[in-house]
Image (spheres, grey):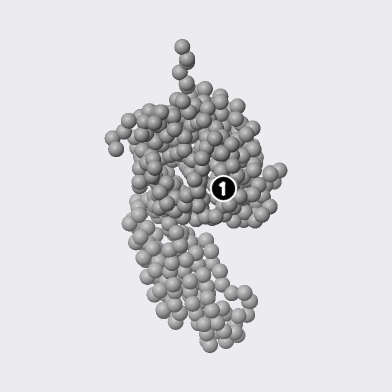
Amino acid sequence: MKQKLTARDVLAAAQEERETILAHRRTIHRCPEVGQDLPRTAAYIAGELKKLGYQTQALGGGLVAAITGKDTGRCVLLRADMDALAGREQSGLDFQSDNGAMHACGHDMHAAMLLGAAALLRKYQAQLNGTVKLVFQPDEEGFTGAKAMLKAGVLEAPRPQAAIALHVNSGTPSGMVLCGRGTFMAGCTLFRVTVTGKGCHGAMPETGVDPINIAAHIYLALQELVSREVPAKSPAVVTVGRFQAGELPNVIPDRAVLEGTIRTFDRELSEQLMERIRQVAESVAAAFRGSALVEELASAPPLRNDPALMDQAARWAEEVAGPDRVLRLDQGGMGSEDFASYTYELPCAYLLLGAGTAQEDPRFGRPMHNPAVVFNEDVLPLGAALHTWLAMQELGVMRDE
């Protein structure tokens, strides 16, 4: 009689795939691409999936592949992002990028783990109680990727009953799985304020309208929105991360630009803050004889993990990683993730996978997006096993739809 497959069997099989998964990660890492259009990354992933016998579909700038065991009508979606960040990498890795972009958020790790899961799912195809849909998504960083794939029909033919995603987390012990209940990550709105004045010589400011002065007053005014207009028990952050104006020290320019983010756990509060930014910018600019144009560049809503699915996912993760390696959390952070858009369409579980601390290795533990961040590659097989086991287990669960 054939022995029943266990989570430890899946983890052992993932460890056997270790070198292949590492090769995937390093290949993707060497040639990072930013945004919605990722031709080299997508071509590589499509090629590797085809080697495993998958048919791939280009969809919404990303890739979709599916594998079915027993055709039960059940379907679960596994998602990995594959875009990178603009900036020059300073990790010192032998395979670091040199093209002005960098995988400083671990999306190369995510894509490699899902490719590893694709191999494992092929191995266990006969034991799948339904269909697993593999989604490789672009432009998570710009908050357009999930929305583009949703609009293009990623939840159709077949429609999944649940979606699962993993994200590596620098600064968390390697192999620790963080399972957040409820609203686990903040929503984020990216905004731009373009201030228009009238350029003139720096020796005669009275002949122009100084957009830098206006933008500085707007910047200071925005700092008061949270402290004086948002209840203290409602987490909110307004950050201006870009302030750009002028080219010469003795010339007042025509324009100044501020760009920043709004982060909250409440979609209505985010909308209110966006409207207040518009009102403040326009009023301040008018007071100083200029004008201001406020634009919303992109947004992701707060990420809501489905309570029932997350409770089950945590139990299944314990079977793979061990009971002492899974941490359940009732409070999340102010970081954002565009997988959140999926969480308003179907039950979702978004888990964090620890990828190293400085105590483990001095190279590990730097903040996400830091140009010198280094992730522990030892967690890659665990991530592939988690994807595989969670998908297989979810296909065996009946839910009220």
Residue placed most toward the observer, 352 or 165: 165
Give coordinates of residue 375: x percent, y percent. Answer: 60, 41
Circle 1 residue: 42
Q: Which residue does the image show at 59% across and 42% down from the upper left?
A: 47
Residue 47 seen in the figure: yes
- Judge left or right: residue 127 versus residue 272: right
Q: Could you say which quadrant of the image residue 24 lies in?
A: top right
- Of the 4 image quadrants, the one containing the C terminus is top left
Q: Most extreme residue toward the left, as rendered?
A: 400
Q: Which residue does the image show at 59% across and 39% down from the upper left?
A: 48
Residue placed most toward the observer, 401 or 29: 401
Give coordinates of residue 367: x percent, y percent. Answer: 56, 47
Give coordinates of residue 175: x percent, y percent. Answer: 54, 33
Residue placed most toward the observer, 18 or 251: 18
Three-letter amino acid code of the residue under disc 1: Ala
Picture mark count? 1
Alpha-carbon neighbours of circle 1 within 10 Å: few (<14), some, or many (≥20)?
A: many
Residue placed most toward the observer, 101 or 55: 55
> Can you say whether 244 is above or below 29 in the image?
below
> Can you say whether 175 is above or below 273 in the image?
above
Q: Which residue does the image show at 50% across and 55% down from the upper left?
A: 142
> Can you say whether 394 is above or below 106 in the image?
above
- Judge left or right: residue 217 versus residue 84: left
Give coordinates of residue 61: x percent, y percent. Answer: 50, 52
Residue 385 seen in the figure: no
Which structural element holds mark 1?
helix
Q: Most extreme residue toward the top, as rendered?
A: 1
Q: Which residue does the image show at 40% across and 74% down from the upper left?
A: 282
Q: Could you say which quadrant of the image residue 251 lies in?
A: bottom right
